[in-house]
Image (tube, rainbow, N blue to C red):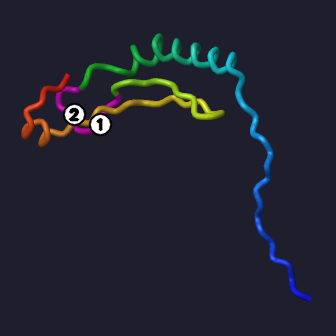
């Protein structure tokens, strides 16, 4: 008798979703935390001679059921600045 081959199969269980009221409440509290505590304490003006990338902005984002704190980094490259002559803000 032939041996049956075992395989993984996907279960069609529906993933739970986050209610809109909870999303809005969590987003409001997280954004208040960012504006009141994180940005004033951790985001300073760009360094005079940056050797590495530095955080320019912090924000939140929902992706499906997941909530993320995200950071936008500024990229500083002296070679590009000298060649193109662009001004940095």
Q: Residue furthest bottom?
A: 1
Q: Secondary structure at mark 2?
A: loop
Q: Is residue 33 magenta?
A: no
Quadrant in the picture for residue 83: top left
Q: State the residue at coordinates (80%, 45%).
A: 13
Residue toward you, 25 or 17: 17
Q: Secondary structure at mark 1?
A: loop
The answer to whether residue 72 is above or below residue 24 is: below
Q: Are marks 2 and 1 in contact (CB under 8 Å)?
A: yes
Give the numbered dot on residue 53.
Answer: 1
Tally the numbered discs. 2
Secondary structure, magenta segment, majority class: loop
The percent coordinates of residue 62 (x first, y second) are 57, 29
Question: How many other residues sit within 10 Å of disc 1, few (<14), some (14-19) or many (≥20)?
Answer: few
Separation of residues labelled 2 and 1 (CA atoms): 7 Å
Q: Is residue 29 left or right of residue 86?
A: right
The answer to whether residue 79 is above or below residue 56 is: below
Query: In which quadrant is the N terminus drawn?
Result: bottom right
Q: Which residues are magenta?
A: 47-55
Q: State the residue at coordinates (76%, 64%).
A: 8
Question: How many other residues sit within 10 Å of disc 2, few (<14), some (14-19) or many (≥20)?
Answer: few
The percent coordinates of residue 74 (x first, y second) are 29, 32
Q: Which residue is mark 2?
A: 50
Quadrant in the picture for residue 89: top left
Q: State the residue at coordinates (43%, 24%).
A: 58
The percent coordinates of residue 69 (x first, y second) are 51, 29
Quadrant in the picture for residue 24: top right
Residue toward you, 33 or 48: 33
């Amino acid at each position: 008798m032939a041996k049956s081959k075992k395989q993984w199969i996907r279960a069609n269980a529906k993933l739970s979703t986050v209610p809109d009221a909870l999303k809005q409440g969590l987003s409001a509290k997280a954004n208040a935390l960012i504006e009141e505590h994180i940005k004033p304490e951790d985001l300073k003006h760009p360094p005079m001679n940056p050797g590495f990338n530095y955080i320019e902005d912090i924000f939140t984002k929902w992706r499906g059921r997941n909530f993320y704190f995200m950071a936008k980094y500024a990229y500083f490259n002296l070679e590009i600045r000298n060649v193109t002559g662009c001004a940095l803000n």
